[in-house]
Image (cartoon, rainbow, N blue to C red):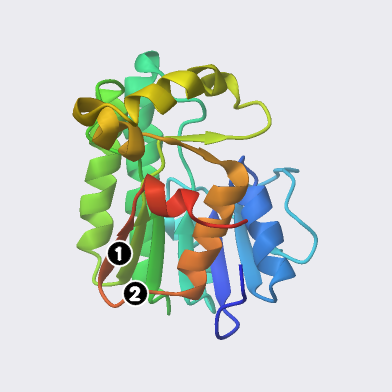
Amino acid sequence: MPAGPGRRTVFVTGGTGYLGVPLIRGLLERGHAVRALVRPGSSGPVPAGATRIAGDALRAETYRDQVAPADTLVHLVGTPRPGSAATAEFRRVDLVSVEAAVAAAQSAPVTHFVYVSVAHPAPVMQAYISVRRQGETLVRASGLSVTILRPWYVLGPGHRWPLMLAPLYAVWSIIPSTSDGARRLGLVTLAQMVGALIRAVENPPEGVRVVEVPEIRSTRG
């Protein structure tokens, strides 16, 4: 993917996670500055070159004064491996953290908010989807330029079990009654997702832009 215009300073929440580490590495490789939010006392893996910012992702007051000079905030905090038993966690972590991130962004010189939501509608994971849709509503109302990415499942190390569904996706994609759902709920790779996030950072929209699975999959990581 060719480099976008301008060097950006990016504040990343969830910077020690599955998406956060490769995203930060990719941003640094492309010449951007990164400030990564980590829990106080955490020894989580933040790529060398990023600035570690200690704070609680659920409490904006613990880190909002350290967002500056970032012009972009990428919010990646969420319940790891969400399942049907994690409904309370979705509201306690996913929803509260995006509320905090929006508040922190609004009090800083941030002009672009990047939010990872989830593909919807879908036949499963209704509680998770409901919370992510509430998150979308929050970021849309923030007054910032917003990019919302809607992956369904991101394939990568430790996250490969849906590969067994690949033959079914192939069949569903050619049946008229299921082809739309197969495209919207398709699988994306970690490289594609990171590439789509970098492209979002480097190309902020005017207003709100939504990036669905087919566009994520078109990204060359």
The kind of residue tagged 1 is Arg
Viewer-closest of 187 and 55: 187
Secondary structure at numbered mark 2 = loop
The kind of residue tagged 2 is Pro
Is residue 19 positioned above or below 129 on the image? Answer: below
Asked if disc 1 and disc 2 are in contact, CB closer than 8 Å, the reply is yes
What distance separates the C-alpha of mark 1 from that of mark 2?
6 Å
Viewer-closest of 85 and 167: 167
Q: Quadrant of the N terminus?
A: bottom right
- Place of residue 192 in the rendered image (x, y in percent of width and height, measured from the top left): 56, 50
Viewer-closest of 212 and 112: 212
- Point 67% across, 51% down: residue: 22
Relative placement, left or right, of 171 versus 193 is: left
Q: Quadrant of residue 140?
A: bottom left
Disc number at residue 209? 1
Relative placement, left or right, of 115 versus 36 is: left
| Label total for image | 2
Q: Quadrant of the C terminus?
A: bottom right
Q: Dot 2 corresponds to which residue?
A: 205
Secondary structure at numbered mark 1 = strand
Disc 2: CA contacts within 10 A as few (<14), some (14-19) or many (>=20)? some
- Place of residue 71 in the rendered image (x, y in percent of width and height, measured from the top left): 48, 77
